[in-house]
Image (spheres, rainbow, N blue to C red):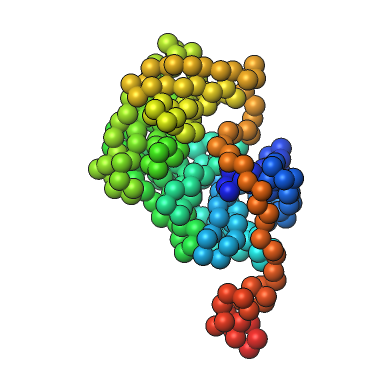
Amino acid sequence: MGSCRGFLFLVVNKTQKLYLWNPSNGVCRKIPALDPDIFVYMYGFAYDESTDDYLLVLVSEVLAFFSIKTKSWEILAEDCQYTSQWDDEPTAGSILNGAIHWFAKRIQQPPPECFTIISFDIITKNLREIPAPDDFEYGLGILGVVEGCLTLTENRDVIKMWVMREYGVKSFWTKLYTVSAYEAHIESISPLCSTKDSQLVATDGTLGLVKLNDRGELLEHRKFYPSPSSLACASVYTETLLSLPRQYSKLAHALLHDTPQLIKVCQ
């Protein structure tokens, strides 16, 4: 469900068995479930430089995050108004500009207005919307980050991909290209990264990889498994030997980082 500073965020078998794992040095930590009975629509994993802390964010009937340092969940909203576009499995967030982003669906609002991009600020813990392109027509969108810009891919018979050249500004959505799914023999495109010569690397709707040039022409297609695997996603991983920060109780965290909060706790 994501990668950050050498750590992979793993969700096991659609249950709330959550783990952080650094394959380079074997550091692994199990994260307690918020509530094993709720269904999680979206997960996010990010690093907060201001507190030297890792956050696991989930969007379900509630909006909540887990702090590695305090070893605790905090519920930010009891009645979250967003779900994922798929009801059978959660989606992973994309990190950009200090925020986690998902392509989401508003609850109790008819299409086509119900689909939007939501952004969770890692420091302020606020959730806001970022508009999709005007000519985005279909609900099944794949969000990504390529070369420091948000990308949105509409996967249908003709695959369309947009890039947001200026962050948060709707008028700066630009359509990169369209690809015939039939001619390219791929089900969908989920962007991962770009090469040094600006070729796009993406997953193919299963657990294969594709490479396209800046005109949307298929250059390479590698299949690693014969069939799709449910609840599996690819993520760009950078090797590090980092360990997770030390865990503190809420009182110890206040002592180190927040004197007014410490006074409140003591009172």
x and y percentages locating residue 238 in the rendered image: 58, 41
Against 57, residue 189 (above or below) is above
- Horizontal side of residue 113 vs 70, given as left or right: left
Against 263, residue 84 (above or below) is above
Which of the 4 image quarters holds residue 225? top right
Against 87, residue 258 (above or below) is below
Give the position of the C terminus as an image quadrant. Answer: bottom right
Extreme-bottom residue of the structure: 267
Task: Please give the name of the residue rendered at 63% of the width and 33% of the height, measured from the top-left corner.
Answer: 232
Q: Is 265 in front, or is 248?
A: 248
Extreme-top residue of the structure: 183
Q: Is residue 207 visible?
A: yes
- Horizontal side of residue 193 vs 132, given as left or right: right
x and y percentages locating residue 193 in the rendered image: 47, 34
Against 140, residue 106 (above or below) is below
x and y percentages locating residue 165 in the rendered image: 31, 41
- Horizontal side of residue 262 vs 182, given as left or right: right
x and y percentages locating residue 220 in the rendered image: 48, 16
Which of the 4 image quarters holds residue 143? top left
Task: Please give the name of the residue rendered at 67% of the width and 75% of the height, measured from the top-left corner.
Answer: 252
Which of the 4 image quarters holds residue 160? top left
Task: Please give the name of the residue rendered at 40% of the width and 43% of the height, measured from the top-left corner.
Answer: 148
Give the position of the N terminus as an image quadrant. Answer: top right
Q: Is 24 in front, or is 33?
A: 24
Q: Is residue 73 visible?
A: no
Q: Is 143 in front, or is 98?
A: 98
Number of marks in picture: 0
Task: Please give the name of the residue rendered at 55% of the width and 83% of the height, measured from the top-left corner.
Answer: 260
